[in-house]
Amino acid sequence: MSTTKKKKAQDDPAAHSAAADGQRLGRTRKRLLKWYDANARDLPWRHTQDPYAIWVSETMLQQTRVDTVIPYYERFLEHYPDVASLADADLESVYALWTGLGYYSRARNLREAAQSVMTDFDGELPGQAEDLRALKGIGRYTAGALASIAFDREEPLVDGNVIRVLARFLGIRDDVGKAAVVERFWSLAGGLVVGPRPGDLNQALMELGAVVCTPRSPACDACPLGRDCSARAQGDPAQLPRKKKRTPVRRVEAAVAWIERGGRTLAVRRPEGGLLGGLWELPGGELQDGEAPEEGLRRALAETVGLKLLGAEAVASVEHLFTHRRLRLHVFRAAGVEGRVRREGFAEHRWLGASALAALPQGGPTRKALAALGVGEARAPRARLRAAAESAQ
Ligand code: SF4
């Protein structure tokens, strides 16, 4: 440490603490890399230096478990092996390859960003974190991951695993739900990633959080940081990181109908953006306070597709949990409808055979509704992939 920095650290307790944390982290670099070399999981995206492939993997890994991502990653790269092929793809085909991974905005943004890479960067993904962040769907974390892993730049990244490891290792007991506290982790991670092999260092930290320093039962005896770890010394690693209780999950009810005419069923597509944006579903809508499901369905069909419901048979109620909402979806089979479709709030509608409808890109609630109606089982291979992905959504 320089004389000026030492003086500042002595005068200012916060600066002293930051400097001490920095020194402590410096000692851990070698241990982390050594541990990573011996223990890194063998994952397909670790066999490539292709920035595009790494970008696809990092995008899929947001919100989704590694085991679930692997078959999707391989299939996606078979269909779209480079930026140019993805930029040229039609959105529906991209969604079809994403079916079951959830969070479809990731797929939409990936394709849009690929188009920007073609027009603004001659088809080559830029190596600077700042340029990467200008691309649709690439936030601070993904920019750090790409810049460090694919381009060997000293860029930090912070995700839940990194926060957990650093909070325990350094004994940080502040509420990690606060932006200022998260900023501190970025600063600490930035101090750690200085030096050789920044991409491996970042991956080592995340890997340690994923397989050793796990949320509920950290394996401290097998941890390369165990010797210097504050939380281990205090005997309470599972208590960290601290986070104030999340906002309660909101309960929402909705009703949808299987409406058949001449052997074809009505499907509607949501507008792009927002929850389930761009995906297909059965027509219907959210219930209002105190509204019975069939009554709400009747109103929603009149308002959103201009059809008058003549009667309906209740088939099932399915549940789906989003990040902040628990949806109870009442599924009906319409006995008949009157009128012509006049859309309000949906981007598109189609009358389709059951198998064509089941093959459209759709969200979790619609998949569950179709399963309750006995539609979609024919697509066994994808259904298996979806089942694996379901638990991660
Ligand atoms: S010693 Fe335990 S608590 Fe500390 S970083 Fe390692 S696994 Fe986590």
Image (cartoon, rainbow, N blue to C red):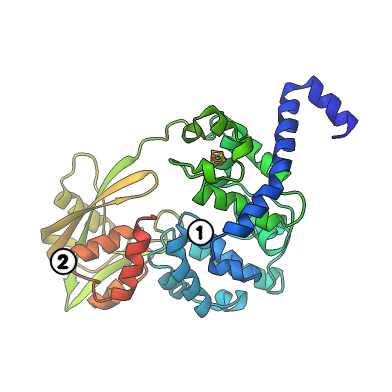
| Residue 149 image point, x, y percent | 66, 60
| Residue 319 image point, x, y percent | 25, 51
Q: Residue at x 17, y 78 (%)?
A: 263
| Residue 85 image point, x, y percent | 57, 79
Name the foreground residue: 69 vs 42: 42
**Numbered label attached to residue 338:** 2
Rendered position, 367 above or below 233: below
Disc 1 residue type (three-letter) = Leu
Q: Residue at x 60, y 37 (%)?
A: 169
Residue 269 seen anywhere in this rendered image of the structure: no
**Contact, mark 1 vs mark 2 (Cβ under 8 Å):** no
Task: Using a 10 Å C-alpha cutoff, classify the residue at mark 1 as few (fewer than 14 neighbours), some (14 to 19) or many (20 or more).
Answer: some
Identify the image quadrant of the C terminus: bottom left
Name the foreground residue: 391 vs 343: 391
Rendered position, 74 above or below 57: below
Disc 2 residue type (three-letter) = Glu
Local SS, label 2: strand
**Numbered label attached to residue 61:** 1
Rendered position, 22 above or below 159: above
Q: Residue at x 51, y 59 (%)?
A: 61
Identify the image quadrant of the N terminus: top right
**In the drawing, does residue 384 fall left or right of residue 134?**
left
